[in-house]
Each structure stands twice: as C-alpha cells, then as structure tokens.
Amino acid sequence: MNVKTKRIWAVSITALIITLSVIVVFSQNLASNRTDNKVDRVACLGDSITNMTGYPADLQALLGSGSTVGNFGYNGAAVNFFADRPYYASDEYRAARAFLPTTVIIMLGTNDARTNLNESIGNFTGNYEYMIEHIINGTRRFTSQPRIFLVIPPPLFENSLNLTSTTLKQEIFPLIHQVASDMGLPLIDVYTPLVNHPEDFSDGVHPNSEASQIIANTIYNGINSYSI
C-alpha cells in the first residue's frame, strides 16, 4: 500500500469515526428526551381551568414539536365521587387513557370546594387515590405507564360559582398534599405564583391568558425539575 493510499484510508477511517460518534451522541440525546423526560405525549387532566383556558396550548409551545399535549379537561369535574361530575367517570378520563400518555398532569380539586360537597369532603383522599391507583394499576389503567404529576390548583377569588377560597385552601389543599405524599407523586404548585393576582381572574375562578401562561410555565418547570 503506497503512501497516498494509506492517507486516503486514514482520512476515511477518521471520517467514519466522527460520523459514528455524532450518531451515538444524537441517539443518546434522542433517547434522553424520549425516555428520561418522557414528554412525548402529555395528558392534561382537569376541570374547566384546564379545558377552557390556554394553559395546555401554552405548555405545548414550551415543550415544542417533539411533544404532543392533549387537553382532557372536563368542565365542572371534581375528584369526589359524590359530585355531579366526578372526573373518574368521565369520557375525558377514557379519552386520556386512549391517548397513551407518557406524562399525566392532574389539576383537580377546585370543584371539590363547592359548599354542597362539604359533608362528603372526607371522601376526597380515598377517591383521588383510587383514581390514581387505577391509572397505574387498575382495570382502567393507562397501559402506557405514564409518570404522574399532581397540581395544586390556582386560587379562588370572589365569584358567583359557589366555590369558596377558604375550603379550597384549608380543606382541599392539605388533602392533595396527603395524596401526593401517600402515593409518592411529585407536586406542582400553581397557587402561589397567582395568589396575588386577582386581576387575572375575570370571574374569580378562571385564569386569563396571562395567568394561563404562568400555569404553563410553572408546570413546565415542574416537569423538568424531576427525573424519572
């Protein structure tokens, strides 16, 4: 083999090594994005604060084209099985399961602060844990085995929807914390960054576009702060 041929072989081998290295790095990054972050398919479960605001769309924009965010909000939904609209019994729950999410965001509890549910509020923890257990393991489980995040919902201000801020803060929030602790689930708080912004809630309950963006930002940061 002459000198020229040896040089050609050396250059070719070097180029091949560089190409293989790039492929390996790209594959690792892709695997990291799709396995470690698990944001391929994000299901947003909740009530009208999910369904009727821009937060899922804002979250989609933050996650980018590599992810698909599904909005599975159900207006009036509550955790409590004694409510008029328990989320677990909804078509939206079934649609979320069929979506095969890799990450599930659950923001419920606001409608459990209705005065007509005060007497059955003791069922909240058991009902919430039952629903989550069935997402993980039950007969109606999510076969995609998603990671699950619970969300402390945004604040309530003066409203005509029979929802009380005191019940939400003093009764519901501690129960959500208990569920997260009992089941070892990460908890994201969107209440705190919005509690001093009543101007962003025109009816005292539903966030406007600015508040929806804050919710999306907070959930996005929460997702990224946890590893598998």
Image (tube, grey):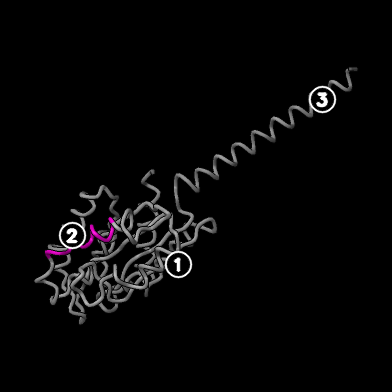
The segment highlighted magenta reads 122-133
Please tell me whether residue 211 belongs to the stretch shown in magenta.
no
* In the displayed structure image, the side of residue 44 where residue 77 appears, left or right: left
Out of 196 and 17, give the one closest to the viewer: 17
User: Which three-letter amino acid code belongs to the residue tagged 1?
Assistant: Ala
- Can you say which quadrant of the picture contains the C terminus? top left
Q: Are marks 1 and 3 in contact (CB under 8 Å)?
A: no
Task: Estimate the spatial distance between the alpha carbons at disc 1 and disc 3, rounded to whole Å.
Answer: 52 Å
**Residue shown at 36% from the left, 70% from the top:** 73
Residue 7 rendering spot, x and y as whole percentages: 83, 22
**Residue shown at 79% from the left, 27% from the top:** 11
Q: Are marks 2 and 3 in contact (CB under 8 Å)?
A: no
* In the displayed structure image, the side of residue 198 where residue 9 appears, left or right: right
- Residue 59 found in image quarter: bottom left
Residue 62 rendering spot, x and y as whole percentages: 47, 58
The disc at residue 126 is 2
Q: Which residue is mark 3?
A: 9
Q: In the image, is residue 217 above or below residue 54?
A: above
N-terminal of the pair, mark 1 or mark 2, is 1
Q: How many marks?
A: 3
N-terminal of the pair, mark 1 or mark 3, is 3
Q: Which residue is mark 1?
A: 57
- Residue 79 found in image quarter: bottom left
Residue 155 rendering spot, x and y as whole percentages: 23, 67
User: Which three-letter amino acid code belongs to the residue tagged 3?
Assistant: Trp
